[in-house]
Amino acid sequence: MEQSTTQTHNDSNLFEQGVEWFVLILLIVSLLLLIYQSVFGFGGFIAASKYEKQLVNIKMENANWVSNNIRMAIEVNDLKFGHELLEEDARNNFLLIKPGEDVYRFIEK
């Protein structure tokens, strides 16, 4: 009887050690998965670095678009209210001559 109790106790002890090892391995694997996810996963360090570079490029492109928009808004405003730019364009492209003006063209040979 004593031997069967000892055998049961040893089996129980082995079972508990097996569970402890299983839990330990499970915790280690879980930790490794969390580390992998935080480095390589969506929103991880590598992805965040890539998104940071994309953000810098987008901000630079946006600044270029803003400066183009400002330049074009000034040009549109000049076309609406400034006759000098319109007159200059007509003179250069359509050979506009005002009444009483003399225009001389020099042709190079």
Image (cartoon, grey):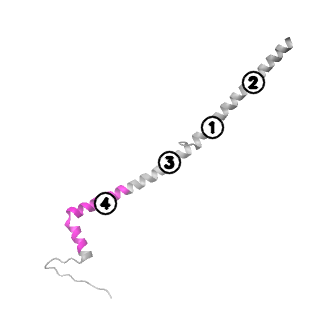
Provide residue 14's location: percent of width, then percent of height.
Answer: 78, 23
Q: Looking at the rendered structure, which numbered label has been put on residue 17?
A: 2
Can residue 82 be found in the magenta stretch? yes
Q: Looking at the rendered structure, which numbered label has been put on residue 33?
A: 1
Q: Looking at the rendered structure, which numbered label has been put on residue 71?
A: 4
Q: Residue at x 85, y 11 (%)?
A: 2
Q: Looking at the rendered structure, which numbered label has been put on residue 51?
A: 3
- First of labels 4, 3 by sequence position: 3
Q: Residue at x 21, y 76 (%)?
A: 96
Q: Residue furthest left?
A: 100
Can residue 32 be found in the magenta stretch? no
Asked if labels 3 and 4 touch by Cβ distance under 8 angstroms, the answer is no
Amino acid under disc 3 = Tyr
State the image quarter where residue 37 is shown: top right
- First of labels 1, 2 by sequence position: 2
- Segment tinted magenta in the rendering: 65-90
Provide residue 90's location: percent of width, then percent of height.
Answer: 23, 73
